[in-house]
Image (spheres, grey):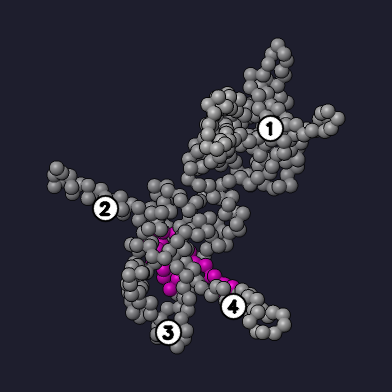
């Protein structure tokens, strides 16, 4: 049994947590009448709060708000709650439809409006749609906007936007949903998006690719988890044991080898190489990989230099040229009497990739 004091304390704690959650963005600017326009620097993932369109003149009441005025008020009220919100003009889009119904030879093309012009209100700045940081949770903010946020201007008849509760629309903004920032390119959104598991795998890790300050890097080595094919739903314990012996067990081992190669490249000069390298490691859901360099432009001359150094080399084998992978050993000089302590194999074709970045 709980005492009255314990119950009061628990209730107070809940209220404090709720207040902290709603006011997670307490320093967000909120100035009446100021317009906060959406830019490519926001997002990349956001909440589509509402899309507002002007009503026809014959239906607008005297003193009623225009779409822009209503959007600005909505943004202001969201910002007063500590939620970063912005406006964006969605232009009208016209589509085309082939028409074969005229009964004449050939076809005609009809145009139709696929999207009406509207003023959109977007809120939040998330690196992924499932971001779950304690002070910046996408799910928590979306739930609050959909179920608990009540814009005060919607209750004032003079604004012309009275909201009527219905079974299918219990709150004015319950159709809010996650979306990408519409003013960012698809490649930019992809570059800035890292899901929660991948973020956890790479957070606070030494030499993490997420710490690379460049826009591009050269992927030179890939380590994947092992797999085995089963036929007719059967398994062979002998085959499985042999597979594990030769190829290793799982992604943990692949991640460890990738990290060790990164560390080896960063201290290569101590192992007898002419220099050390700016190397990074990244753990994905199904593989880990190592990259070299930090570049602001895909035309950086160092990219070609590294590609030639770490890429595969053609050798003659049984009368034909075969592309073979470049090796990296510690130490560099290996002899029959002094075998390598560690050995790695690079990808035969290095690839220039964009650095995944988090806001």
Badge 4 vs badge 1, beta-carbon distance below 8 Å? no
Q: Is residue 339 visible?
A: yes
Who comes first in sequence, dot 4 or dot 3?
3
Mark 2 and mark 4: Cα distance apart in space: 51 Å
What residue sits right under mark 4 in the picture?
112
Dot 4: element: strand
Q: Distance between the residues labelled 2 and 3?
A: 41 Å
Return the residue nearer the eye: 146 or 208: 146
Foreground: disc 2 or disc 4: 4
**Relative to 27, 241 lies left or right:** right
Q: Where is residue 79 in the image (x, y as percent from the top left)?
A: 41, 62
Crowding at mark 3 (Cα within 10 Å: few <14, some 14-19, many 20+): some
Which quarter of the figure has residue 104? bottom right
Q: Which mark is residue 346?
A: 1
Say which of marks 4 and 1 sits in front.
4
Please state, as top left, top right, bottom left or bottom right, where the N terminus lies in the image.
Answer: top left
**Which badge, 2 or 3, is on the more N-terminal residue?**
2
User: Separation of disc 3 and disc 1 at Cα?
Assistant: 68 Å
- Residue at image position (72%, 31%) is 325
Would residue 209 appear left or right of 325 to someone viewing this image?
A: left
Mark 4 to mark 3 CA distance (whole Å): 26 Å
Q: Name the residue under label 3.
A: 60
Pair 1/2: label in front: 1
Q: Distance between the residues labelled 1 and 2?
A: 55 Å
């Amino acid at each position: 049994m709980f005492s009255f004091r314990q119950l009061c304390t628990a209730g107070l704690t809940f209220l404090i947590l709720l207040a902290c959650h709603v006011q997670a963005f307490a320093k967000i600017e909120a100035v009446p009448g100021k317009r906060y326009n959406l830019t490519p620097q926001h997002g990349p993932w956001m909440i589509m709060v509402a899309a507002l369109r002007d009503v026809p003149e014959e239906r607008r009441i005297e003193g009623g708000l225009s779409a822009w005025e209503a959007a600005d008020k909505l943004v202001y009220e969201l910002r007063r709650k500590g939620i970063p919100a912005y406006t964006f003009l969605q232009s009208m889009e016209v589509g085309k439809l082939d028409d074969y119904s005229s009964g004449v030879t050939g076809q005609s093309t009809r145009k139709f409006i696929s999207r009406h012009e509207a003023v959109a209100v977007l809120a939040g700045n998330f690196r992924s749609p499932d971001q779950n940081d304690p002070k910046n949770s996408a799910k928590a903010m979306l739930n609050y906007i959909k179920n608990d946020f009540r814009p005060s201007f919607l209750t004032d008849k003079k604004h012309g936007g009275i909201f009527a509760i219905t079974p299918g629309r219990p709150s004015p903004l319950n159709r809010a949903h996650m979306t990408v920032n519409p003013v960012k390119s698809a490649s930019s959104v992809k570059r800035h998006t890292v899901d929660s598991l991948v973020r956890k795998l790479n957070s606070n890790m030494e030499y993490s690719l997420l710490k690379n300050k460049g826009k591009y890097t050269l992927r030179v080595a890939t380590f994947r988890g092992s797999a085995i094919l089963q036929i007719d739903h059967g398994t062979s314990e002998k085959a499985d044991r042999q597979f594990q012996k030769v190829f290793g067990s799982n992604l943990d081992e692949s991640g460890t080898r990738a990290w060790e190669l990164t560390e080896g490249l960063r201290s290569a000069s101590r192992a007898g190489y002419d220099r050390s390298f700016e190397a990074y490691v990244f753990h994905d859901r199904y593989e880990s990989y190592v990259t070299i360099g930090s570049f602001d432009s895909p035309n950086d001359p160092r990219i070609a230099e590294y590609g030639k150094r770490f890429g595969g080399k053609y050798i003659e084998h049984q009368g034909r040229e075969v592309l073979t992978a470049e090796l990296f050993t510690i130490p560099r000089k290996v002899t029959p009497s002094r075998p390598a302590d560690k050995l790695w194999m690079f990808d035969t074709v290095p690839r220039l990739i964009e650095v995944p970045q988090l806001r």
